[in-house]
Image: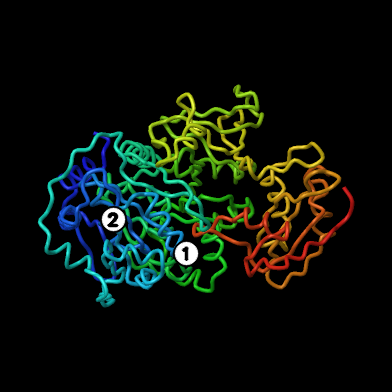
């Protein structure tokens, strides 16, 4: 059966004595861990959360949050991990939209329950301490006491197509859409990834990205094979390096901004990271220059770039270590690829007329496969728009080359039409990234009387570097066509980012139109440089 309940029962039978969890308090083997999961399931059942019911978790990464998520899989209930960076009103809106029957709240966020409208959820909340050494809040019934007092629940036997987890899209602004990810979706993608990662029982996976994001589902591949999980509540470069050394991490899942910060941190090079064998990275584009720097900094470590979406639970294509090696051997253009579709995924590129285009031509990426979700919770219109005729329409623009490598060019909404020409902002950003004085860049469109839209590059200069629009324009000449060169440039200290390190282009578009209320973008100074 492709269900997470079945996976956990199999792991218990085959890997019960293997280490499942390591943290500052010691370790648990899979027999001990699943016993706690079964009691957590019984505790939630006693709170009135049954099969198919939804319950929320407002917490940073922790073993306790993982237990509660797995307890949902075990019992047939549906966990809803919540983005703790949202405002109380946004969290209350999400809980209402999901129809949650209970909410677990880490002590760090209990104060949010004092603010309307989230205060209405206090009676359905219980405390969840992320740090085993921290005191319980004393404000709410506490998870550990409730779990330890509960009777273990027998494993539920769900259908493969039942909802297993509800994850919300939308970054840090607004509720977004609840993505209904099934048991089949999670297990199928875990099997696909386990093969590519060559997962074994001795592996240890470092959970760094927030667990409310779908990228955390990648770690299910280790649960399948009795591997070990280590959770970091917060990302810091030193914290990641210390965890790799202390817990002998073999697989690290990181986003590009995390990798860049690690490479730039003074702690890099001071820790034994020889256990590391895979760096799995993705969720946002990474400049080829930084990929090369990462490969140089981690010799012998397999680099695997993943492309996926929440709706694909999460991975649909991988640029594996063999493709990275090809890139170093003279095929550098592969570093700009999202990879090849994983086994079981059918992928097509459709033109504006809805027909498949030949290799090399661009269009919308549409897919079908066992990891494609059930649609959106309580959003029939959005579900009908995105899931048509058995295919999921991703909203991403891409092309596939003659070898089957997928190149993700842009989001549909991020493509800029200037003077009648379609410009993919990722291509412009890739050219600008080649300037040694550029630390980060994002390109967006802004209104223009003559061309309809104009390209605006928002740039974070490298430390100690002074840049001008003219220098950026001159750098781009010969690298990209003239109509693709941004003539409007703004220099900022930092780009607005989501919890996963994705640049929030919606915020940038608002800023270049003078609409942003974000402090770091207030009064954004856009400079004009040269003619088109």
Looking at the rendered image, the disc whose residue lies closer to the viewer, 1 or 2, is 1
391 or 252, nearer to the observer = 391
- Describe the element under mark 2 as helix, strand or loop: strand
- Describe the element under mark 1 as helix, strand or loop: loop
Using residue 39 as the reference point, say whether residue 460 is left or right of it: right
Point 32% across, 62% down: residue: 121
Q: Which residue is mark 1?
A: 87
Using the image, determine if residue 400 lies above or below residue 311.
above
Q: Earlier in the sequence, mark 1 or mark 2?
A: 1
408 or 146, nearer to the observer = 146
Residue 299 lies, in percent from the top left, at 50, 56
Residue 352 lies, in percent from the top left, at 65, 27
Using the image, determine if residue 190 lies above or below residue 437.
above
296 or 484, nearer to the observer = 484
516 or 184, nearer to the observer = 516
Res. 228 mark: 2
- What whole-number distance in Å separates the C-alpha atoms at marks 1 and 2? 33 Å
């Amino acid at each position: 059966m492709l269900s997470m309940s079945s996976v956990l029962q199999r792991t218990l039978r085959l890997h019960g004595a293997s280490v499942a969890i390591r943290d500052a308090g010691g370790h648990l083997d899979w027999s001990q861990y699943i016993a706690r999961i079964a009691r957590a399931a019984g505790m939630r059942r006693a709170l009135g959360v049954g099969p198919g019911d939804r319950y929320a978790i407002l917490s940073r990464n922790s073993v306790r949050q993982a237990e509660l998520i797995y307890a949902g899989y075990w019992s047939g209930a549906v966990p809803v991990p919540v983005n703790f960076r949202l405002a109380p009103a946004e969290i209350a809106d999400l809980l209402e939209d999901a129809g949650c029957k209970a909410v677990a709240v880490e002590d760090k966020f209990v104060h949010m329950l004092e603010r309307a409208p989230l205060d209405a959820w206090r009676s359905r909340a219980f405390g969840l301490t992320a740090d085993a050494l921290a005191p319980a809040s004393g404000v709410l019934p506490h998870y550990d006491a409730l779990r330890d007092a509960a009777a273990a629940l027998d494993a539920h036997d769900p259908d493969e197509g039942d909802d297993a987890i509800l994850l919300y899209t939308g970054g840090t602004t607004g509720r977004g859409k609840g993505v209904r990810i099934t048991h089949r979706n999670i297990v199928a993608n875990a099997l696909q990834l386990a093969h590519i990662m060559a997962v074994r029982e001795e592996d240890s996976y470092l959970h760094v990205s927030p667990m409310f994001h779908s990228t955390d589902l990648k770690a299910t591949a280790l649960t399948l094979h009795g591997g070990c999980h280590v959770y970091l509540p917060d990302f810091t470069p030193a914290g990641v390096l210390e965890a790799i050394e202390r817990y002998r991490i073999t697989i690290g899942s990181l986003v590009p901004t995390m990798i860049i910060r690690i490479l730039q941190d003074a702690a890099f090079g001071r820790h034994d990271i020889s256990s590391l064998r895979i760096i799995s990275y993705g969720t946002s584009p990474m400049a080829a220059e930084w990929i090369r720097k990462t490969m140089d900094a981690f010799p012998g470590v397999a680099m695997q770039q993943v492309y996926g979406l929440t709706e694909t639970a999460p991975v649909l294509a991988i640029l594996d270590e063999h493709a990275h090696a090809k890139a170093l051997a003279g095929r550098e253009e592969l570093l700009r690829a999202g990879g090849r579709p994983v086994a079981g995924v059918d992928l097509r590129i459709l033109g504006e007329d809805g027909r498949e285009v030949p290799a090399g031509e661009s269009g919308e990426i549409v897919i079908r496969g066992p990891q494609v979700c059930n649609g959106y919770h309580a959003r029939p219109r959005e579900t009908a728009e995105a899931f048509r005729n058995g295919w999921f329409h991703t909203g991403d623009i891409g092309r596939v080359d003659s070898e089957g490598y997928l190149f993700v060019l842009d989001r549909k909404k991020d493509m800029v039409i200037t003077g009648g020409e379609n410009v993919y902002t990722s291509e412009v950003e890739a050219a600008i990234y080649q300037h040694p004085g550029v630390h980060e860049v994002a390109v967006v469109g802004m209104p223009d009387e003559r061309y309809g839209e104009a390209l605006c590059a928002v740039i974070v200069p490298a430390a100690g570097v002074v840049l001008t629009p003219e220098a950026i324009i001159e750098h781009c000449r010969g690298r990209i066509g003239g109509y693709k060169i941004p003539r409007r440039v703004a220099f900022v200290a930092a780009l607005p980012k989501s919890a996963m390190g994705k640049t929030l282009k919606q915020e940038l578009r608002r800023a270049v139109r003078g609409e942003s209320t974000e402090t770091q973008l207030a009064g954004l100074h856009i400079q004009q440089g040269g003619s088109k």
